[in-house]
Image (tube, rainbow, N blue to C red):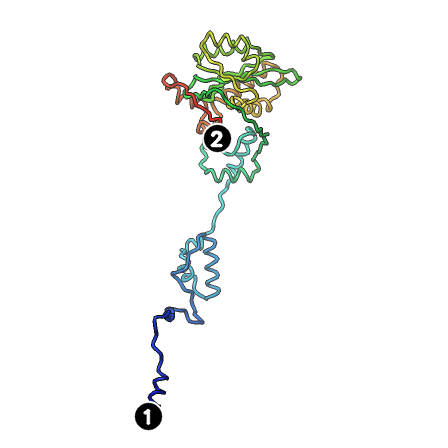
Amino acid sequence: MDGSILREADKAPARAGRGKPQAQAAGCRPEPGQGDAPGGGHKKTLRAPQKRSWVARLRERFGVSERRALRIVAMSRSAFSYKAKARDCSAIRLRMREITQTRIHYGCERVLVMLRREGWRDNHKRVHRIYKEEGLSLRHCRPRRSRSSRRRQPVKVATAPNRLWGMDFVIDALFDGRRFRLLPVLDHFTHECLDIVVDQSLGADDVADAVARLVAQRGKQEAIKVDNGSEFAGKVMDRWAYENGVELDFSRRGTPTDNAMVESFNGRLRQECLNEHWFLSLADARSKIEAWRRFYNEERPHSALAWKTPAEFDREHGSQANSLAPKEVEISTD
């Protein structure tokens, strides 16, 4: 009797201690052979084409209806059956080709500004895509110079019109090889080209006379940015500047970036005017260069001026010309 009781006690299960509890079976587990796709907890696809492909997969694998598959991927029936229609862009393509054929050095942003002026409402993405598809992109490889030079004086920055001018020479030739010189004069604040003097030879006296004429027309400026050429650094311009109370701000030797705005303008002048025309005489050169100067001031949009023309920018800020003064900015030499 006692032996049978002990045997029954030996067969009794041992009590669970403080060890790791046993894992419980997960609830709501799908049974094998489920006839439908689980829904509600999956991540929805981002793009409409991917959702359409998922609808086809669900219908093929689980045999569900189109309505059920669309509900699973969270897509409406109208979006599922939508067929994109490509817009006819032939008109704007033609106009962009016309603009770039006339102004062959215009980039995509400048072409977009010209289109907006004409009333086109296409956004910048469509214009950029068409610009690339039509092969209108131009890439100019410019040499890079590794040069360091210490500046000993602060840089003058114009904060009002007619306070800081800049000028430099450009050389070109007539059809028969005879060379002539150009002297562009720019306003550093408005980017306006005040004048382009054209002659076979331009000396220091000619430079002083040209600046004196501009001062008589527009009033006296405070400083002029120039390089170290003999026409600017000679006694004639030094005397004129002293008598008129104008400072000549000379750039460092071998550093054209000190007069970067004028150098950039001279590059545009050569690309968009000098390289595009065949000059038969000096009078013909003066006429064509003056026409381009007016276009540059009154029609050509400038990215540095928020895509305004220098004439528009001057009209907006001209009333403040007498109340603002140029400031000096120190450049770190570290």
Point out residue 280 in the picture as x, y percentages from the top left corner. Answer: 63, 17
Residue at left offset 48%, top offset 61%: 57
Residue under pointer 2: 114
Category of crowding for the residue at label 2, using alpha-carbon neighbours closer than 10 angstroms: few (below 14), some (14–19), many (at least 20) = some
Which is more foreground, mark 1 or mark 2?
1
- Find the distance from the CA under tag 1 to the CA under tag 2: 111 Å
Q: Residue 328, located in which quarter of the rendered image? A: top left
Residue 24 visible at all: no
Point out residue 272 in the picture as x, y percentages from the top left corner. Answer: 56, 25
Circle 1 — which element?
loop
Q: Are marks 1 and 2 in contact (CB under 8 Å)?
A: no
Q: Nearer the viewer, residue 304 or 277?
A: 304
Q: Nearer the viewer, residue 334 or 108?
A: 334
Q: Amino acid at mark 1?
A: Met
Circle 2 — which element?
helix
Q: Quadrant of the N terminus?
A: bottom left
In the shown orientation, is residue 15 left or right of residue 114? Answer: left
Residue under pointer 1: 1
Q: Residue 275, located in which quarter of the rendered image? A: top right
In the shown orientation, is residue 222 left or right of residue 268? Answer: left
Which residue is at the far front?
Answer: 2
Q: Nearer the viewer, residue 247 or 114?
A: 247
